[in-house]
Image (spheres, rainbow, N blue to C red):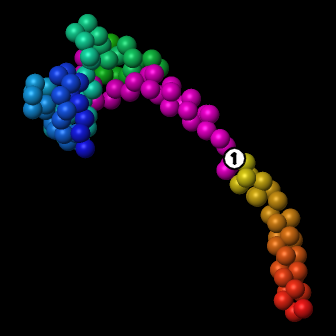
Amino acid sequence: METTCPRCKQTINSQAVTCPFCRTQLKAYGHPGIPLHQAAGRDEYLCDTCTYHADDTCNYPQRPYAKECILYQNLEERNLDLLSQNQKPRVNVSINNWIKRNQSLLLIISLFLICFLLVLSRS
């Protein structure tokens, strides 16, 4: 898999710990499986757009002036994800609920169909 470096925008391997072009650290030091999020500009801070800063659950010591963070979660992306989840059709849930409420009716209908098929097979 490939991704782009947030600093130099070069295409790099998604498993790279540092960018081979500009030497920007991409993963948390000592934890190569954890991505290190970095602020895009010199005057920008991750906290301005972070979910944890918005709901006041962040305990990062550099808050509200963090330029890099491993726990960063973009507030806009999270809101879009929640919105898209709420707009998904809930047809399967409705059908499953109807089946659970009407199990006895379905049982009677299935017995009737089995009897009807047995009668047809004997003819």
What residue lies at 80% left-to-right and 56% top-to-bottom? 101
As drawn, the residue found furthest toward the bottom would be: 122
Rendered image quadrant of residue 109:
bottom right
Residue nearest the observer in this picture, 3 or 99: 3
Q: Amino acid at mark 1?
A: Val
What residue lies at 23% left-to-right and 30% top-to-bottom? 4
Residue 28: % across, % down: 20, 33
Q: Which stretch appears magenta?
A: 66-93
14 w.r.t. 101: above or below: above
Residue 15 seen from this side: yes
Q: Is residue 36 left or right of residue 90?
A: left
Rendered image quadrant of residue 83:
top right
As drawn, the residue found furthest toward the top would be: 43
- Can residue 61 be found in the magenta stretch? no
Residue 63 seen from this side: no
Secondary structure under tag 1 reads helix
What residue is pinned by disc 1?
A: 91
